[in-house]
Amino acid sequence: MPKMNDAYAALPGSYLFSEVARRVKAHREAHPEAEVISLGIGDVSQPLIPAVIEALHQAVDEMGKAGSFRGYGPEQGYAFLREAILEHDFKPRGVALEADEIFISDGAKSDVGNIQELFGPDAVVALTDPVYPVYEDSNAMAGRAGERKDGRWSRIVYLPCTAENGFEPALPERRPDMIYLCCPNNPTGTVLSRAALTRWVDYARENDAVILFDAAYESFISSPEIVHSIYEIPGADEVAIEFRSLSKTAGFTGLRCAYTMVPHKLRAHAADGTELSLHDMWLRRQCTKYNGCPYIVQRAAEAVFREPAQAQLEAQLGIYRANARMILDTCTSLGLEAFGGEHSPYVWLRTPQGMKSWDFFDLMLSRASVVCTPGVGFGACGEGYARFTAFASPEQTLKALERFQSIL
Ligand code: PLP
């Protein structure tokens, strides 16, 4: 038998969503008449907007003609898309990035999972708890996480985020090399203030650390006080890599397009002290292992950043925002403590009467046929919380909340 990567043997199973699916299946079998509503999924439900569909059709036609057919594209993505991103996402916010600091890809999940390859096997990782599981698992797969005991990895620095600290992680006591921050946050739906992000950027600069900033949900931000990009914080272009995605912004979860910013100023050092550019390393990595996001998808993505797409997307985001507001209002009207939902499609509920996350999940499923996500599945500090998502239809969301109200 071939020798395996031992780090995979130490990985816990992907328990959370498979266990959710198992319990939902058992409930459906026991109650075939029940209409199960899911407020658990992190996937969009609204169809692609007309402007994107039109751009796709045009690009498909181009691919069928000799004069406009395209094969392999440029490694970092087409210039038309990178320029559109600069114009739309960064220039209006005063962020001076260069087009060649943007890397187009087929998803933020692969980029946030792959980026750790640039760092040494003994680099120390800091993660918030609760957390989007990809950050932790991808480092564990690379053998960087140490031993797993009582649901935690020995070499990972965990940064608790709970109602008690306002979901703002404290600066770590032990210096990490890599710091994952997700804002607006999945799963808590909360955001970090400009002041909090400034503290992190300053910390990273003082401690030679790199911030891996996941902004997959930035389009949900609804206040001018909250920054959309970490590069709005002075000095962040020396210490931060940012990940963005069209999945939740424009309903691209099935189409697949994301982009990652790796500024030229970012540096890391090799074991012998040689300084290297993280930008050059990521370019090298992508050129070797990735052949690009499809041309037709990049054309669809380009359309997202122009009118009439922006107006169409605003209407679509409005549906999810209204759902989030409905979930938040229902929870608070029931006297429950709920967080997030304002700048995010996620509402993070403190379970009533101190119930354990899975007990609350079972109660919701058995009595209301409503699926949520148990907070403990995102990390130890998620115990006693549950995540609700705003991605179901307004009708389903309303129905689920009526049932929720009736069982409490
Ligand atoms: N980052 C966060 C925080 C997410 O929640 C998700 C998806 O749920 C992703 C990244 C992945 O996005 P993509 O669909 O672009 O792979």
Image (cartoon, rainbow, N blue to C red):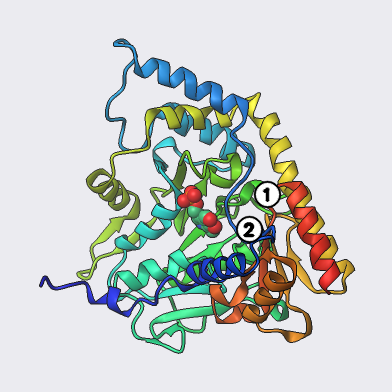
Q: Are marks 2 and 1 in contact (CB under 8 Å)?
A: yes
The residue to which callout 1 is attached is 220
At label 1, the amino acid type is Phe
Question: Is 301 rendered above or below residue 346?
Answer: above
Of helix, strand and loop, which one carries label 1?
helix
On whether ligand 1 comes within 8 Å of the CB at mark 1, the answer is no
The numbered mark at residue 44 is none
- How many neighbours does mark 2 have within 10 angstroms: few (below 14), some (14-19), or many (20 or more)? many
In the image, what residue occupies the spot 68% across and 30% down? 312
Q: Position of residue 211 (x, y in %)?
A: 48, 63
Left/right placement of residue 325 relative to residue 133 reads right
Badge 2 marks a residue whose secondary structure is loop
Q: Give the left or right position of residue 28, taking residue 127 as reference.
A: right
Which residue lies under the disc numbered 2?
A: 184
Q: Residue furthest bottom?
A: 150
Q: Residue at x 66, y 81 (%)?
A: 359
The amino acid type, in three-letter code, at marker 2 is Pro
Horizontal placement of 70 versus 408: left or right? left
- Percent across and percent down for residue 21 are 53, 66
How many labels were placed on the picture?
2
User: What residue is drawn where x is 33% and y is 38%?
Assistant: 292
Question: Which residue occupies the foreground of this view, 354 or 153?
Answer: 354
In this orientation, does residue 235 appear? Answer: no
Earlier residue among tags 2 and 1: 2
Nearer to the camera, 394 or 196: 394
